[in-house]
Amino acid sequence: MSEPVRPPEVDRVAASRKAVAARRARASLKRDLSTRVVSPQDVLRAATADPQSAAGTLRVPEFLTALPAIGEGKRDRVLAELKISPVKRLGGLGARQREALRQWLDQRSPEPQPRPGRSRLVVLAGPTAVGKGTVAAHIRENHPDVLLSVSATTRAPRPGEVDGEHYFFVDDAEFDRMVADGELLEWATVHGVHRYGTPRGPIDRALSEGRSVLLEIDMQGAFQVRESDPRATLVFLLPPTWDELVSRLVGRGTEGEEERARRLRTAKAELAAQGEFDFRIVNDDVADAAAQVVDLMQASAR
């Protein structure tokens, strides 16, 4: 018995929904490119692997203008230079065109390259609301061999906080001494009031014992740590998409509209600095992201 023929109008509705979903996926991908949540090289690789994906069906001119600081004039010059037709989609590029585009991307924005001689000291940083604290907490709970650094601060303890466990609580005079004596890997004044810093002593002792150490700090602190200890491994935590980052920030409900807008502007600036890190990890799943951080620690030890 033959299968019933689906009415044409049903096929049209299904095709229309599929087309709308594909346009939305491409629009989301272009936002991710413009905010640097995803690298253009990653998008090109995804297009090559699956020409029917959002990346694969993205036209090359749209791909180029989604990149920061690429306008229509520069886009057209690049297309002419690389001999790529403006009607081409990323997934439909020939091998020569794809290689030419990859080389152009690598020259414009090189991907992070791990430095040799890295230590077990891993610094985890990233934009606001990306989930650094959640990933760090998962590592603390599931990998007791990893030392999570405890910061020193000049603010008073909050209810339930324990000195030496949550923070080392010190007064301004003691913090000044720690700075003067070089006892802090990094430090900063937060919100113009209290100071926070990472004591060097516990980290040095843990590393000398062969343990791994994780610092979950902000971008400014990450670069200070690199200056203090060039062998430190810097890891940048990325959101799955820009839309997801916005959703997480709004979902927290801890900031007003003006503060959210400020944090998102800051997040865009922070995402632009990811190329200065050794590794990038996407926090799509907390357990998986935490496992990747721990794997980097173990790789550094070999």
Image (cartoon, grey):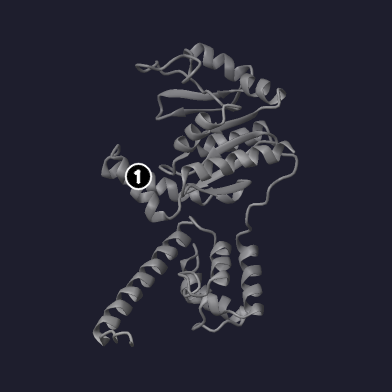
Q: Residue at x 27, y 87 (%)?
A: 8
| Residue 71 appearing in the image | no
Q: Is residue 271 above or below residue 205?
A: below
Residue 185 rendering spot, x and y as whole percentages: 61, 27
Q: Is residue 220 above or below residue 208?
A: below
Q: Amino acid at mark 1?
A: Leu
Q: Give the camera-side residue of 106 and 241.
A: 241
Quarter assignment of residue 122:
top right
Q: Residue at x 36, y 50 (%)?
A: 246
Q: Is residue 16 left or right of residue 82?
A: left
Residue 208 rendering spot, x and y as whole percentages: 72, 23
Q: Quadrant of the N terminus?
A: bottom left
Quarter assignment of residue 111:
bottom right
Q: Residue at x 50, y 73 (%)?
A: 56
Q: How many marks?
A: 1
Q: Quadrant of the C terminus?
A: top right
> For numbered disc 1, what is the local secondary structure?
helix
Residue 172 rendering spot, x and y as whole percentages: 48, 14
| Residue 99 appearing in the image | yes
Q: Which residue is mark 1?
A: 249
Q: Is residue 95 left or right of residue 71?
A: right
- Which residue is situated farthest in the front direction here? 1
Crowdedness of circle 1 by 10 Å Cα count: few (<14), some, many (20+)? some
Residue 5 rendering spot, x and y as whole percentages: 29, 87
Q: Is residue 183 left or right of residue 24?
A: right
Q: Is residue 11 above or below residue 21?
A: below
